[in-house]
Amino acid sequence: MKLILLPLLLCSTLEVSFAMTVHIQFMVVKLRSTLTPVAMESLPGRDLMNCATLCALRPACFGFGWLQGRLCRFFDRLAFSSTDGWQVSESCDVYTKIVDSQKQTRLKFGSCKQSTTIESSVCDRAIDGNRNQNYTHLSCSHTDNNPIEWWEGQLAAPSFVSYVTIYNRQDCCAGRLNKFSLLVDGVECNRVNMTESFSVASFSCNAIGSRVRV
Ligand SMILES: *[C@@H]1O[C@H](CO)[C@@H](O)[C@H](O)[C@H]1NC(C)=O
Ligand SMILES: *[C@@H]1O[C@H](CO)[C@@H](O)[C@H](O)[C@H]1NC(C)=O
């Protein structure tokens, strides 16, 4: 996976909201469909629940179809952005993940690391609970200024990451964080490319895993 991240300045606090793995649900989006997305992976499957569980355990899996009695087909999120490109299939029901927003909880990072550190602005400053967005007040992490830099937090357990909220530094240079990717367990869940800088913003992700990288 190529990171498109440019100089990274994460300020203060990085928060993740999620629904616990036990709350992951799937819904039918197409009944007895004879057109399905192109599968990113196929595996033998006992039944519908077996396919749902296997999909829930795959960070990149956003939906699945079960070919009666034998095969789970897994689809990534991109496959659902449009039905152009769906291919003729043996009839099956197509499911996608849903996240119960009522059950969203804020996730906590247990530890973190980052590609490089300057001015002793260690990765932990991004998750110290202090949301001050003035870098000089020592609550922001700071990497070096190389083409590819990153910050990564480790969650206690694999979780459904609905979105990531970032508090950007505001004393200067906020535009350095206009282009970046969000990854969960090494799989890209969002690619951000903005022309305007932000102060505080939430970026959708909707992937399951325990390592969240910006
Ligand atoms: C950031 O903090 C420094 C030191 O307290 C202060 O001089 C500066 O004005 C602050 N910048 C902003 C944008 O608030
Ligand atoms: C960001 O968007 C601009 C146009 O809006 C495009 O020219 C550029 O290639 C994009 N950059 C990345 C890294 O996707």
Image: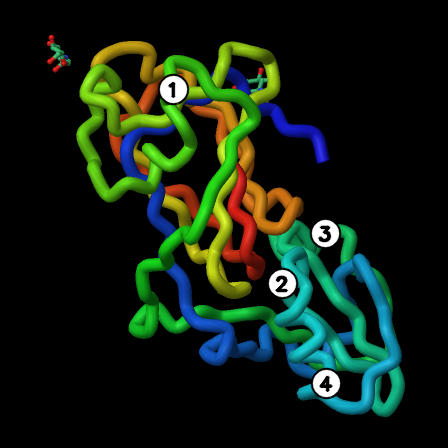
Question: Which label lies toward us, 1 or 2?
Answer: 1
Looking at the rendered structure, the kind of residue marked 4 is Asn
- Give the image quarter of residue 101: bottom left
Q: Secondary structure at mark 4?
A: helix
Q: 23 or 107: which is nearer to us? A: 107
Taking the spot 86% from the left edge, 80% from the top edge, the residue there is 71
Depicted 48 relative to depicted 178: above or below: below
The residues bearing labels 2 and 3 have C-alpha atoms spaced at a distance of 17 Å
Looking at the rendered structure, the kind of residue marked 1 is Ser
Q: 86 or 168: which is nearer to us? A: 168
Is 161 on the left or on the right of 58, as rendered? left
Taking the spot 86% from the left edge, 73% from the top edge, the residue there is 43
**Mark toward the start of the polypeptide (3 vs 1):** 3
Is 207 on the left or on the right of 64, as rendered? left
**Mark toward the start of the polypeptide (3 vs 4):** 4
Instruction: Decide if ligand 2 comes within 8 Å of the CB at mark 3.
Output: no
Q: 182 or 85: which is nearer to us? A: 182
Q: Secondary structure at mark 3?
A: loop
Depicted 33 relative to depicted 195: above or below: below
Q: Which of the labelled discs sits on residue 84, or is there none?
A: 3
Q: Which of the labelled discs sits on residue 120, or is there none?
A: 1
